[in-house]
Image (cartoon, helix red, strand yellow):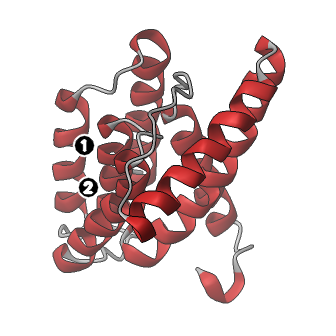
Amino acid sequence: MFSPALVLWGLLGAAAWHDVRSRRIPNRLVLPGALLGLLLNTLPLPDLAPAGLLMALAGMMLGLALLLPMYALKALGAGDVKLMAMVGAFLGPQPVLLAVLFTLLSGGVLALAAAVYSGVLRKVLTNTGQMLLGGFLQGTLRMTPPAASSGKLPYALAITAGTASYLALAAGGRLGVLA
């Protein structure tokens, strides 16, 4: 039986693999993946109620919009933002909102684990504080903060883990009225 969720899992796995190996998520993976998500939401497939093209587009735009501020703060790369837009094309708007929430939680756990493992937890916490202060300064006082490097984390792993968590909980009916 064909499952769009399995296609999404495969695309996320490929993105995570690329991100771990090269710290980049190729456009040649994300763009066709997003188009496939839009297409699959318009086709009448057996045992599947497609969301429809407009809902898939809304999910794609929401996935993009939710991570775009983190790109503007230089906390994420453009590939990460485009990957979440691709996820939104598969899931639609309400599910991608939950997938982003699970992704942010997964990213926090991943970042803490990587910082502890590499012995740079203090630096990561300092950079996080500087990033939050920088966002405040830019947003409220129109001041430009000094740039602070926060390292490179293959965030496709967090997007994959967060989306997989959402899909697993949704399939098990454990999201209640939120799903």
87 on left or right of 75: left
Residue 90 percent across, percent down from the top left: 34, 59
Spot the residue most to the bottom. Answer: 177
- The residue to which callout 2 is attached is 37
- Image vertical order of residue 82 relative to residue 171, above or below: above
- Image vertical order of residue 86 relative to residue 18, above or below: below
Task: Give me the disc on residue 33.
Answer: 1
Q: Depth check: give the residue in front, 36 or 162.
A: 162
Q: Amino acid at mark 1?
A: Gly
Residue 55 percent across, percent down from the top left: 26, 78
Residue 3: in sight, yes or no?
Answer: no
Q: Could you give the CA–CA distance between mark 2 and mark 1, rounded to whole angstroms?
A: 6 Å
Residue at 47% across, 27% down:
16
> Label 1's element?
helix
Find residue 113 and report its image quarter.
Answer: top right
Q: Residues within 10 Å of mark 2 (few under 14, many from 20)?
A: many
